[in-house]
Image: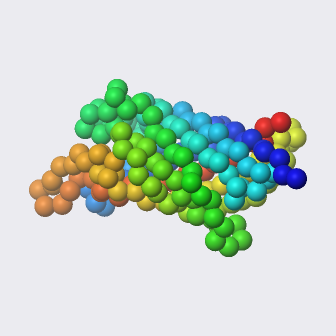
């Protein structure tokens, strides 16, 4: 008989990161510093996972205060009106040993759309304090204007300031709850 297992995200060993091309020839990276997840599995089978994730928009950090403030403005996230980014998993499917596809609904800027993410499962391990942990590397791409994040500027050469594509680079360590 299977039992429900609850997992919590370990924020000290997890990072919710992204990259966007700037002026179409360099990447600017950022991350969200405040986030949480509620994950339930049958025993330790992540293929049965019920996943709910949330990040605080006002915790965005790109290493530049002026850029961060612009990202919080109505030009981008409009953090005053849309304070959270949410993801609700709908399936976690094994592709091959250690590789999975995570499908779910991403809600950002008041828009909910399905996304598919690639997941590399690192396995289970006991830390020095006896906690059981699971590790995941998650990558994917979204088109930001599909969520209403359409701000851009045209460059003198006819190019655009910011790529429409946002690359997600997420490292997650989960802790099994007793």
Q: Could you say which is closer to the camera, residue 174 or residue 12?
A: 174
The color scheme shown is rainbow
Name the residue furthest bottom.
96
Q: Say how many tags the image has.
A: 0
Residue appearing at x 30%, y 57% in the figure: 163
Query: If the image is split into quadrants, where does the C terminus sit?
Result: top right
Q: Please provide percent x and percent y for residue 171.
A: 60, 50
Vertical comparison of 14 with 100: above or below: above
Q: Please provide percent x and percent y for residue 82.
A: 37, 32
Vertical comparison of 88 with 123: above or below: above
Residue appearing at x 18%, y 60% in the figure: 159
Question: Does residue 168 appear in this view?
Answer: yes
Q: Please provide percent x and percent y for residue 66.
A: 31, 32
Vertical comparison of 130 with 23: above or below: above
Residue 76 position by quadrant = top left
Q: Please provide percent x and percent y for residue 12.
A: 66, 37
Q: Could you say which is closer to the camera, residue 113 or residue 23?
A: 113
Residue 129 position by quadrant = top right
Residue appearing at x 26%, y 34% in the figure: 74
Residue appearing at x 74%, y 41% in the figure: 6
Name the residue furthest front.
1
Question: Does residue 21 appear in this view?
Answer: no
């Amino acid at each position: 008989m299977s039992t429900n297992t609850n997992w919590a995200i370990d924020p000290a060993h997890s990072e919710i990161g992204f990259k966007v091309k700037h002026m179409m020839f360099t990447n600017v990276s950022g991350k969200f510093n405040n986030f949480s997840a509620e994950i339930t599995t049958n025993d330790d089978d992540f293929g049965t996972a019920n996943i709910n994730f949330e990040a605080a928009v006002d915790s965005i950090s790109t290493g530049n205060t002026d850029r961060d403030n612009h990202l919080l403005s109505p030009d981008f996230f409009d953090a005053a009106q849309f304070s959270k980014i949410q993801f609700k998993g709908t399936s976690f499917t094994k592709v091959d040993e250690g590789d999975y596809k995570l499908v779910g609904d991403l809600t950002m800027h008041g828009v909910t759309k399905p996304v598919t993410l690639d997941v590399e499962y690192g396995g289970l391990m006991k830390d020095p304090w006896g906690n059981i942990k699971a590790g995941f590397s998650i990558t994917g791409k979204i088109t930001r204007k599909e969520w209403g994040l359409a701000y851009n500027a045209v460059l003198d050469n006819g190019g655009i300031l910011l790529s429409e594509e946002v690359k997600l680079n997420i490292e997650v360590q989960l802790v099994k709850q007793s």
